[in-house]
Image (spheres, grey):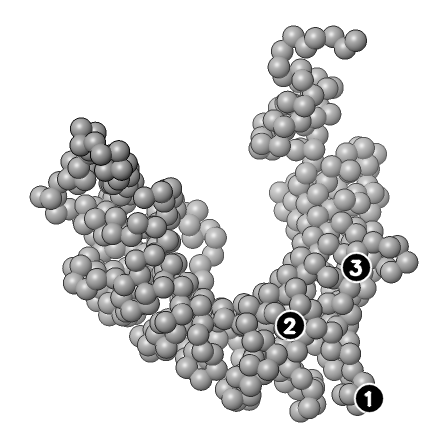
Amino acid sequence: MSPVPKSPLELPELLKRISRFVDLNDALVCARVCKTWSDHFASAVWHTIDFAVHKDLDKMDVKVLARYSHHIRVVENICERHQILVLIASKARKLKRLTIDMTATQDFYAYSADLLRRVNASLEHVEIVQYAEDTVPYFAVDSLFPATSTGATSKLSFIKIDGLMMTRDSLSSLLENCPSLDQLDIQDTTLLFLPTYDDSDIHFYKHSGVTHLTAPIGQIFGLGHTSENTPSLFIHFPNLKTWSTWSIGSDGPEQVSRKVIRDQVTKYCPVLTALWTSTRAPISIGMFTQVFEGLTEICIRNEEFSAELVVAILDHRETLNQVYTFTSDYFYDSEVIPETKSNQLGTGGWIIQSLPRHCTGLKVLQFPSFEMDMDDVDHTKWACQDLEELHIRIQGLDTKEKIDRAVKLWKEGRIAIQKQANSEQEGSDSSRLQLGSIIPPGDKSIEARVARHLLKFKKLREVWLGWKVRKVHTKV
């Protein structure tokens, strides 16, 4: 009979559950308590290896790595050949996520392919990127999925291959052997079509699971690499919902007519309704007005934003539910309130307000680099009553203290409204808490004005007003 534990922390089941929720520093402390704790917290300690952070890891005794390698699930920022060799020697075989920044040497390519073949049965997310421009190698596509003889099936749902080269047949093979694939990013990969036989003999595999594709216009249509009769890449993705054209360079889209793009989208991607575009404004405007109908989601680059672009976006006012500008993650993590770009679009950011005023189905509005004037906001009612997320700057709401107070008033107002609704359902007036006690009618401060505006949207659950994303429950 097992001895009764003296403390709940001696229960293996409890220790195992706790280890799932601690951060790396706490896991390291816990792992040093005793051997039992070390065994339980080892998975948290060794779960993620980031060679950009753990710079001396490749100097560790391989025997130590081999002892704990079965815990490794994520490996980030491989950029040296010896880092690959360390992983191979450690016999880590259960990786779920792997990112490699390739160096332009044949040895690096060979060892990278070797590592991928060893872990491809467990991988769910992989990023292979090469930034060197002097050498563009063929990518060993077959290294990404298990060989048929193994009986294993690829679990990859996200693949990013940038700065490399593959043939169109290789792309078809990749799609055919990765049935779980949902997102594919081949933005800077060169796709070659080798015209050694008629188009009728080519196998254009159609992957019904891919819903998100990142590829510039020139790549989609194989400019310079395919014959006129070769179908565009769209033929491979019959259930594509989101197309990201993240390409700020000249990728030759002027050589593809809007009619050709529209015809190919209509023919091969009938459910494509989300467009993320970083192309120059005139090209994006043509995409919004001449290629697509009924877009539900639009994302654009800050640098390309203009009044003309807003007018083009309004062509989709009846169907649009998400519109935002592309913003790097660190933008929201910053402790410094970022600068705004109101002057690009006129005083008060009035043109941006055309979107919430006319798009009745809008749920997400995120323009964190631009600001609005509350006088202009109050002038005309926003039609998007089902708004759920709002990221915007407000003129005058320019300090952390003011932003915090506006958010505090909004959250307290939500609680007051909920209590009022509960009291009315119960038929009681004694517990009714008037909203006016939270935001007095006489309070004309910018914080109070912003809070009153936010409270107009009963489903609003997330806001960003210049500092920290804030969330509330929406049971109102």
Q: What residue appears at the point 64 percent right and 81 percent down from the top-left corner?
A: 232
Find disc 1 in the rendering and name its residue.
Answer: 197
Q: Earlier along the polypeptide chain: callout 2 or callout 3?
A: 3
Find disc 3 in the rendering and name its residue.
Answer: 145
Q: CA distance from mark 3 to mark 1?
A: 27 Å
4 versus 315 height, above or below: above
Indicate the position of residue 113 as horizontal and vertical percent values.
80, 59
Q: Which mark is residue 237?
A: 2
Q: SS at mark 3?
A: loop
Q: What residue appears at the point 33 percent right and 67 percent down from the top-left corner?
A: 359
Amino acid type at circle 2 is Phe
223 versus 191 height, above or below: below
Q: CA distance from mark 2 to mark 1?
A: 23 Å
Task: Specify whether 42 is left or right of 253.
Answer: right
Q: What residue appears at the point 67 percent right and 68 percent down from the top-left corner?
A: 208
Q: Nearer the viewer, residue 399 or 124?
A: 124
56 versus 33 height, above or below: below
Q: Which mark is residue 177?
A: none
Q: SS at mark 1?
A: loop
- Residue furthest front in the image: 427
Could you tell me which quadrant the C terminus lies in? top left
Q: Earlier along the polypeptide chain: callout 3 or callout 1?
A: 3
Q: Residues within 10 Å of mark 2 (few under 14, many from 20)?
A: many
Q: Quadrant of residue 186?
A: bottom right
